[in-house]
Amino acid sequence: MITCEGLVKIYKSDDLEVVALQGLNLHVRDGEMMAIIGNSGSGKSTLLNILGGLDRPSAGQVSVGPWDLLKITEEQLVSYKRDTVGFIWQSNARNLLPYLTALENVEMPMMLSSKVDRAYAKQLLEWVGLKDRMYNKLHQLSGGEQQRVAIAISLANRPKLLLADEPTGSVDTATSDLIMGIFRRLNQELGITIVIVTHDLTLAGKVDRVVAIRDGLTSTEFVKRNPNLDDVQQLGDGAGVGAGGIHSIHEEYVVVDRVGRLQIPKAYLTALQITDRASMEFDGERIIISPPKSLEG
């Protein structure tokens, strides 16, 4: 569904140039539900804006389905944003029109595409648990209910890709769990690809894969797998096991780009006191990275 190769985004002003993405690589499978995490300034929001057609890449390759977002025309971009991708903002003010009912808000994107389907709009609000609230104005809805209306709006034109920018950032834990449950149901029942950008590490256990971005590059990723008996024994009595059974485990991988570069987690470098250079050896099976040996003598 998504392919990014050497993706670069540079913001320029008269006397300043900021490189937000420095050759990022990312691949997202059709029907996958995954998260992108990173600190403020890491480039994750820039990536989301490019995938959503809200910003143009500077160089590299980026495609979503059949669309080449580096070469797409302005006219094609309108069709892409209308029909292929749905977007959920953290701020409800960017998702919703306050003077309309929940149902009218969901119908608005349909009106812009000249294909209003009231039955489908009602079905979307039922899917997000607002069957009895669809005729309420926004001021009559809680923050969590408004965010669920935003999810329904993002699906109004049946997109193939759903992008969510900090969708649980302004709600409590219970509502966050409810929203993530809705995402999972939509992913499983509609087969829609979902990419969530967040800084909340607790969401990691609720998606299939987590990709971490650092300094405009993909650094590490965590892939969910179900634990085997050995894993459970290593976790110890009760660890990783809850009322719902054995929890899944995320394995961590360092991402290697096509020219062989990788980002070693900062915690590892700090623990080994590695700063500007490191020693690297290959023992026939493994690559061993260690602090540099003394250059003296």
Image: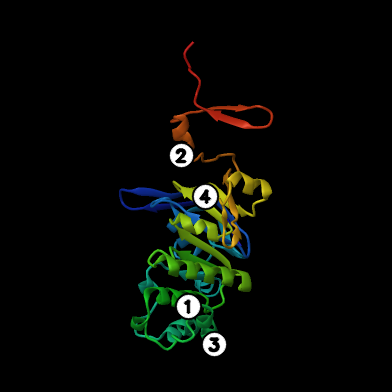
Work out whether mark 4 precedes mark 1 in sequence or the reverse, and give the earlier one: 4
Give the residue at the far top of this rendering. Answer: 297
The circle drawn on residue 153 is 1
User: Do labels 4 and 3 touch, CB within 8 Å?
Assistant: no
- Residue type at tag 4: Leu
Work out whether mark 2 precedes mark 1 in sequence or the reverse, and give the earlier one: 1
Q: Is residue 68 above or below residue 274?
A: below
Residue drawn at the location 58% of the way across and 46% of the way down: 236
Camera-nearest residue between 226 and 151: 226
Asked whether residue 13 is in view, the answer is yes
Work out whether mark 2 precedes mark 4 in sequence or the reverse, and give the earlier one: 4
Could you tell me which secondary element the residue under label 1 belongs to? helix
Give the alpha-carbon distance from disc 2 to disc 4, as whole Å.
18 Å
Q: In this view, does 228 lie above or below 242?
A: above
| Render colour scheme | rainbow
> Percent from the top left, x then y, of residue 75?
51, 72
Q: Name the residue beneath numbered marker 2.
A: 266
Crowding at label 3, few (<14), some or many (≥20) Cα neighbours within 10 Å?
some
The circle drawn on residue 117 is 3
- In this view, the mark in front (3 or 2): 2
- Residue type at tag 1: Ile
- Residue type at tag 2: Lys
Residue drawn at the location 50% of the way across and 82% of the way down: 125
Q: Name the residue beneath numbered marker 4.
A: 24
Crowding at label 1, few (<14), some or many (≥20) Cα neighbours within 10 Å?
many
Could you tell me which secondary element the residue under label 3 belongs to? loop
In this picture, residue 136 sits left or right of residue 161: left
